[in-house]
Image: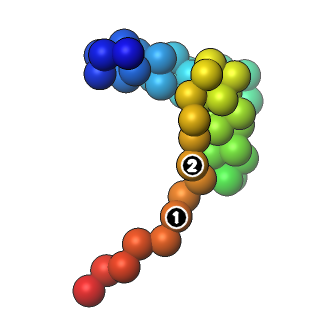
Amino acid sequence: MENESITYAIRGAIYDVYSTLGPGLLEVVYEKALKIELETKGFIVKEQGNIIVN
């Protein structure tokens, strides 16, 4: 997949999740729903990881 088509698919998934769930939920709810939506579209998704900030 090219970067542009990947970006388009991700933005579409974000739109689908938000359209389905609507506003006002906790971020964690949208995050989990987006992970499921992206996996449904064939993406391999890692949840948030830790980073070291100096």
Q: Which residue is drawn at 70% across and 44% down?
A: 32
Q: Which amino acid does label 2 sit on?
A: Lys
Residue 15 place in picture, x, y as percent: 55, 21
Q: Which residue position is annotated with label 1?
A: 49
Q: In this view, does 25 lie to the left or right of 7?
A: right
Callout 2–callout 1 Cβ contact below 8 Å: yes
22, above or below 4, in the image: below
Residue 38 visible in this rendered orientation of the protein: yes
* Real-space Cα separation, disc 2 to disc 1, in angstroms: 8 Å
Viewport quadrant of the C terminus: bottom left
Q: Quadrant of residue 23?
A: top right
Residue 25 place in picture, x, y as percent: 71, 46
Q: Which residue is drawn at 52% across and 64% down?
A: 49
Q: Which residue is drawn at 45% across and 22% down?
A: 11
Q: Which residue is drawn at 40% across and 20% down?
A: 6
Secondary structure beneath disc 2?
A: loop
Secondary structure beneath disc 1?
A: loop
Graded by Cα atoms within 10 Å as few (under 14), some (14 to 19) or many (20 or more), the crowding at tag 2 reads few
Q: Is residue 50 left or right of residue 6?
A: right
Graded by Cα atoms within 10 Å as few (under 14), some (14 to 19) or many (20 or more), the crowding at tag 1 reads few
Q: Which amino acid does label 1 sit on?
A: Gly
Q: Residue 12 carries which label?
A: none
- Can you name the residue that lies furthest to the left here? 54
Q: Is residue 23 left or right of residue 8?
A: right
Applied colour scheme: rainbow
Q: Which residue position is annotated with label 2?
A: 46
46, above or below 35, in the image: below
Residue 18 visible in this rendered orientation of the protein: no
Residue 19 place in picture, x, y as percent: 65, 20
Q: Nearer the viewer, residue 26 or 3?
A: 3
Viewport quadrant of the N terminus: top left
